Image (cartoon, rainbow, N blue to C red):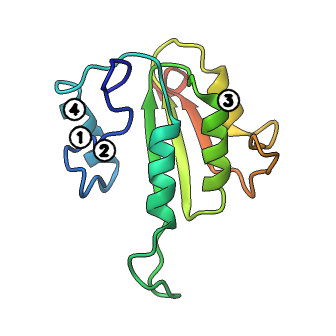
């Protein structure tokens, strides 16, 4: 949920805060569809809280990793608005660039998604507020309207 006083900007879409993962695109779409009837979505659009939580999740080591036991995470963000906490979001994306994760942002609707293009970093690498550069490009932005007929 976004916007209202006391509302959470980071919540488990599947309703299970202890196991918020959803496996696969079909399950992701199904979970998103179900959640629309349970959540009031409105601005401002803040990415930093959920990126901070995802970074902490990816940085934590719950199992010993080896050549045969490796994990990589893909964070899917569906948004209908421009991100309003861009500087904090960039800081978290730069942190994410050192973790085993990628971020896919899908812009739904006709909003101005120019801030998402900046996060995508195809034209200019991201630099945090502490002047640290991203070690790699971890964000891919996809404007849904461009590809909805494809």
As measured in the structure, the alpha-carbon distance from the residue carrying label 2 to the one carrying label 1 is 5 Å
As measured in the structure, the alpha-carbon distance from the residue carrying label 4 to the one carrying label 2 is 11 Å
Can you tell which of label 4 and label 2 is closer to the viewer? 4
Q: Residues within 10 Å of mark 4 (few under 14, many from 20)?
A: some
Badge 4 vs badge 3, beta-carbon distance below 8 Å: no
Left or right, 130 with respect to 33, comes to right
The answer to which quarter of the image holds residue 37 is: top left
Is disc 3 placed on a helix, strand or loop?
helix
Query: Which residue is label 2 attached to?
Result: 28
Query: Which residue is label 4 attached to?
Result: 35
Return the x and y of residue 78 as percentages of the image width and height: 43, 32
Give the mark nearer the N terminus: 4 vs 3.
4
Badge number at residue 31: 1
Query: Which residue is label 3 attached to?
Result: 117
Badge 2 vs badge 1, beta-carbon distance below 8 Å: yes
Badge 4 vs badge 2, beta-carbon distance below 8 Å: no
């Amino acid at each position: 949920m976004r916007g209202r006083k006391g509302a959470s900007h980071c919540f488990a879409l599947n309703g299970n805060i202890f196991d918020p993962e959803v496996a696969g695109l079909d399950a992701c779409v199904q979970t998103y569809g179900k959640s629309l009837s349970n959540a009031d979505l409105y601005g401002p659009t803040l990415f930093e809280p959920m990126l901070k939580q995802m970074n902490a999740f990816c940085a934590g080591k719950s199992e010993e990793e080896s050549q045969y036991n490796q994990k990589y995470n893909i964070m899917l963000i569906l948004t209908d608005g421009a991100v309003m906490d861009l500087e904090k979001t960039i800081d978290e994306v730069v942190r994410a660039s050192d973790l085993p994760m990628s971020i896919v942002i899908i812009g739904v609707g006709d909003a101005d998604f120019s801030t998402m293009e900046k996060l995508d970093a195809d034209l200019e690498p991201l630099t945090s507020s502490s002047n640290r550069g991203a070690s790699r490009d971890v964000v891919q932005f996809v404007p849904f309207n461009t590809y909805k007929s494809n």
